[in-house]
Amino acid sequence: MIWKMFGLLLLGAFQGFMGWYMVKSGLVDNPFVSHFRLAAHLLTAFIICSYILWLILDLLNNPPRVVTIKSINTVLWSFTVLVLIQITFGAFVAGLKAGLFYPTFPLMAGELIPTQMSVAFAEQGWASWVYDLTTVQFIHRWLGILILLGTFGLWLNFRPGVPAPDKKSLDTLLIFVVLQTALGIITLLYGVPLIPAVLHQIMALFVLLASVWNLHNFKNRYALAIS
């Protein structure tokens, strides 16, 4: 465990550096931090929490089990990457204060796909995906819906084929994603009130940790077969 714990120490030190680097961006031209540095600081914190959970699960030394199931490792890795991308865009929304605009769902200014996105893309190109308030909020909204639908699909497809103890991690992931989606919509509709907004950020961490829990459950513990 020495090298693993040393890696954790380095991650903690890097998080301290990222905190300084983020705040520094608000001390130059204006009192607002860069939304890119905010996202990097948040992601580093979430990765540290995920790594700690992974080490805890390693220490629990759960016995291997063998089942025949569709290959779930690739699906779970892809899902976790998608969650990290969604968390990044959530940080962009927070950093740009984009959540204060378009307090309706699912429409934005009466449109499913707002015209402002086309205007921003014409002016900024692909940079509009990370700079334009409308585009950033649109991506964050529909990535959330995609993750919700993907979680239901994952749960329905894989849960029947796993042993009872491992159904819990899939159930937990589904519950957390449903709660996170509801919190996101509530936060948006009510103009980003403090408590729902904070709960939305905390639940994002829980969704990521549930994804990591599932990854650990199925990684190298099952004989997987494509059905």
Image (spheres, rainbow, N blue to C red):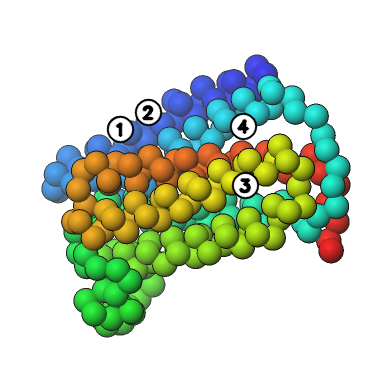
Q: How many marks?
A: 4
Find disc 1 in the rendering and name its residue: 20
| Element under disc 4 | helix
User: Upstream in the sequence, badge 2 or badge 4?
Assistant: 2
Find disc 2 in the rendering and name its residue: 16
Name the kind of residue labelled 2 in the image.
Gly
User: Upstream in the sequence, badge 1 or badge 3?
Assistant: 1
Q: Which mark is residue 170?
A: 3
The x and y percentages for residue 129 are: 36, 68
Name the kind of residue labelled 3 in the image.
Leu
Name the kind of residue labelled 4 in the image.
Trp
* Nearer to me, 17 or 194: 194
| Element under disc 1 | helix
The residues bearing labels 3 and 2 have C-alpha atoms spaced at a distance of: 33 Å
- The answer to which image quadrant residue 22 occupies is top left
Q: Which mark is residue 54?
A: 4
CB under 8 Å between discs 2 and 1: yes
* Nearer to me, 44 or 20: 44
